[in-house]
Image: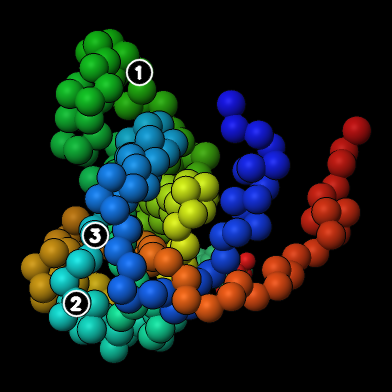
Amino acid sequence: MISKQDILDAFNFRHACKTFDPARKIAEEDFRFILEVARLSPSSFGFEPWRFLVIQDMALREKLLAATWGAQGSFPSASHVVAILVRKGDMRPGSDYTEHFMREVQKLTEETIARKTAFYRQFHETDFHLQDDRALFDWGCRQAYIALGNMMSAAAMIGIDSCPIEGFNQAGAEKVLAQAGVLDLDKYGLAVMVAFGYRVNPQPVKTRQALEQVVQWVR
Ligand SMILES: Cc1cc2nc3c(=O)[nH]c(=O)nc-3n(C[C@H](O)[C@H](O)[C@H](O)COP(=O)(O)O)c2cc1C
């Protein structure tokens, strides 16, 4: 078990690192660990709506920068950049993707698949109202952010810095990725990006509200 203090130290170490040391690259084994943490992240109904695009092509990062105001310092200097893509129509109940997923990945029986599909449909139509394309995509994005958080926390635990990046024009950044042939816009949208590397500048003082200001106990 990791000690609570070690975990808190890692959470205090993590900050939105704006500029990385371009000379320091993350070891392949360490980056695979970060990706493995993403892979193991939880998703609604276990359907893994995501795809992790690791962008190591500096020319593509440069093109993305035109639509990504929030990564002007981080993209050019980061050791690794990940764009988290989210599935669109594939996530609808009864889609080829969910059917294949239940059969081949989750190894469910036909009877369980039928039950789960009905329940999933009810969740989409009645509980969360995900019929609308935008609502469906945003739901996928919320799940992608769990993987994002896990990746950044795990990176911090092994001394690697990161910066989450939502500072982009969505249509503009998606267009760049689509033109590069790495994003099929019919199937996926761009949820969020994240840069990893090693800091060059000292970490700013962390500002947070006190626990009592953000937590309300209901007893
Ligand atoms: C979803 C999300 C998107 C963010 N987008 C950007 C971004 O585009 N560029 C950037 O420099 N920082 C970005 N940040 C970093 C936040 O500004 C930062 O996490 C916040 O100010 C708290 O500071 P800390 O992370 O250093 O503790 C983002 C953070 C989150 C959670």
* Tags 2 and 3 touching, CB below 8 Å: no
- Quadrant location of the N terminus in the rendered image: top right
Amino acid at the residue labelled 2: Met
Give the number of the mark in front: 3 or 1: 3
Residue 129 coordinates in the image, percent (x, y): 47, 48
| Residue found 11% across the figure and 73% down from its top | 180
- The residue beneath circle 1 is 115
Q: SS class of the residue under badge 2?
A: helix
Residue 33 coordinates in the image, percent (x, y): 34, 43
> 27 or 123, which lies in front?
27
Amino acid at the residue labelled 1: Arg
- Quadrant location of the C terminus in the rendered image: top right
Q: State the mark number for residue 58.
A: 2
Residue 179 is left or right of residue 105, and the answer is: left
Q: In the rendered image, which quarter is residue 177 located in?
A: bottom left
- The residue beneath circle 3 is 54
Q: In the rendered image, which quarter is residue 12 located in?
A: bottom right
Give the number of the mark in front: 2 or 1: 2
Amino acid at the residue labelled 3: Val
Q: In the rendered image, which quarter is residue 185 located in?
A: bottom left
